[in-house]
Image (spheres, helix red, strand yellow):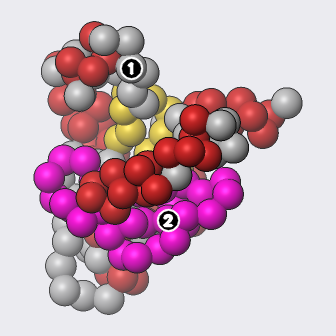
Amino acid sequence: MKSLEKKGIEITWINHTYDHVFNNKPLSSNFLLSQGTNLSYEILANEKLMLKNGLMPSVFFRCPGLVSDRAIIEKLLSFGLIAVGSDAWLAKGQPVHNGSIVLIHGNGNEELGVRDFIRLLQTESDAIKAKHWTLYSLSEGLEQYSN
């Protein structure tokens, strides 16, 4: 992905935690809601790692599993971060609609989502070329709604 950036493709690097917990418990005690989770560490350790590897973290943060609560959101806001959700997680079979935030894991953890995204782009190629179907980065999407 860094090589794509060098070719002029703008990538929005989003914090997703350093090493979040995943267990077989209910969502109310899973991911960042797991007992003993140090959210400050999860945020800052990942940002440090990104910077160390030449990546500029954005203001966006995606909670693992899309699971959070009010305290987590308030902590994110205290760090100046904006929590991002998704209504179209492709690997879970969620359909894409106008205005959707599409979630795929391009890191090899979710081959189905990547294949579905590529298929979606192929299926919609005529609409994309005709500018009837447009992809925006999160930053561009926010700019669209702020005007």
Q: Is 77 positioned to the left or the right of 104 in the image?
A: right
Near mark 1 (Cα within 10 A), the count class, few <14, some 14-19 or many ≥20, is few
Q: Nearer the viewer, residue 134 or 141?
A: 134
Q: In this picture, is 56 found above or below 23?
A: above
Q: Amino acid at mark 1?
A: Ile
Q: Residue at x 25, y 48 (%)?
A: 106
Q: Quadrant of the N terminus?
A: top left
Q: Is 75 positioned to the left or the right of 29 in the image?
A: right
Residue 92 screen position, x and y as percent: 36, 75
Q: Residue at x 75, y 34 (%)?
A: 144
In the image, farthest residue toward the front:
126
Residue 82 screen position, x and y as percent: 55, 43
Q: Is residue 3 magenta?
A: no
Q: Quadrant of the C terminus?
A: top right
**Badge 1 vs badge 2, beta-carbon distance below 8 Å:** no
Say which residue label 2 marks.
88
Q: What SS does tag 2 mark?
A: strand
Q: Amino acid at mark 2?
A: Ala
Would residue 138 be seen by someone viewing this image from the given angle? no
Main secondary structure found in the magenta portion: loop
Would residue 115 be seen by someone viewing this image from the given angle? yes
Q: Which mark is residue 9?
A: 1
Residue 72 screen position, x and y as percent: 47, 59
Q: Nearer the viewer, residue 95 or 75?
A: 95
Q: What SS does tag 1 mark?
A: loop
Q: Is 116 positioned to the left or the right of 74 in the image?
A: left
Q: Which residues are magenta?
A: 86-113
Near mark 2 (Cα within 10 A), the count class, few <14, some 14-19 or many ≥20, is some
The alpha-carbon separation of the residues under discs 1 and 2 comes to: 23 Å
